[in-house]
Amino acid sequence: MRVVIKKPMGTIIFDLDGTISDPATGITRSINHALAKLGYEVHPETALHRFIGPSLHVAFTELTGRSDAEFLARGVEAYRERYILIGYKENVIYPGVKDALGRLREMGYTLCIATSKRPDIACKVIEFLGLWDYFQQIQGCDVQVSKASLLAKMLEDESLRRPMIMIGDRDNDFNAAFEAGITSVAVRWGYGNEAEYRLASASVSDPNELVDVISQLMASPHGGK
């Protein structure tokens, strides 16, 4: 009698910026566009890399010293003037990521996006990158919803298979996964640092390695949750 061992399958939730694609040009230039329109000094693009991942409110609060809701809303609106027209087209998919997504899908995993971007903007990026058919869901936080809340909502979605693993590059990804009670994997090709990577359950340096680590975590009794 042949014994068939079923592979453990579940849902892999990807961050977008710094994980699927390099968004630096579009984000930093759009932040500077907004700063200039608001009457503030623009910054070297590399100095703005630390704002890739967190909410736009974080960026404009730190860069201007203001946190009043009306001002931050103006900043986000000015940012999106450029980003929705030009910035999203400045995304570049990381080498090897598309192949990794294809392998994961062929293995039977459900793939989703959970990003701090507004959902419709995230969809524009995914469509531009030619990745629309890879993902069952594309979920976004915008500036009013935390990523942890977004993951909690996805955990309640009965159409998404368990266990789940969050893939990201910044501390907000790993903290959100911890709060939601799911495993996380840090990708080192994004915009995080060593202190942030240590918050994740595991880390990888290459998309090919990502597939193997996901498989190992899913097979572990205490891996994906």
Image (tube, rainbow, N blue to C red):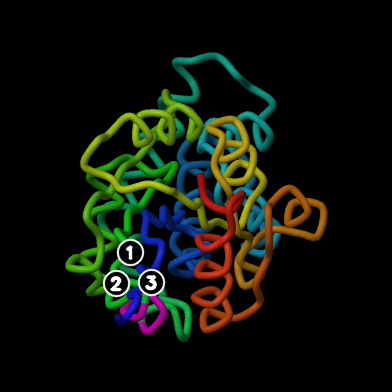
In front here: 218 or 199?
218
Q: Is residue 43 left or right of residue 6?
A: right
Q: Report if residue 160 lies within the magenta region.
A: no
Q: Quick check: 156 above or below 2?
A: above
Asked if the residue at tag 2 contacts the one at tag 3, i.e. Cβ–Cβ closer than 8 Å, the answer is no
Count of numbered marks:
3
Give the mark nearer the N terminus: 3 vs 2.
Answer: 3
Q: What number is the disc on residue 109?
A: 1
Q: Amino acid at mark 2?
A: Arg
Please tell me whether mark 3 sits on a helix, a strand or a loop.
Answer: loop
Q: Residue at x 37, y 84 (%)?
A: 99
- Magenta stretch prevailing secondary structure: helix
Please tell me whether mark 1 sits on a helix, a strand or a loop.
Answer: loop
Asked if the residue at tag 1 contacts the one at tag 2, i.e. Cβ–Cβ closer than 8 Å, the answer is yes
Q: Quadrant of residue 12?
A: bottom left
Q: Which residue is mark 2?
A: 105
Range of the magenta residues?
99-103
Give the CA distance from mark 1 to mark 3. Answer: 16 Å
Q: Amino acid at mark 3?
A: Ile
Q: Residue at x 43, y 56 (%)?
A: 14
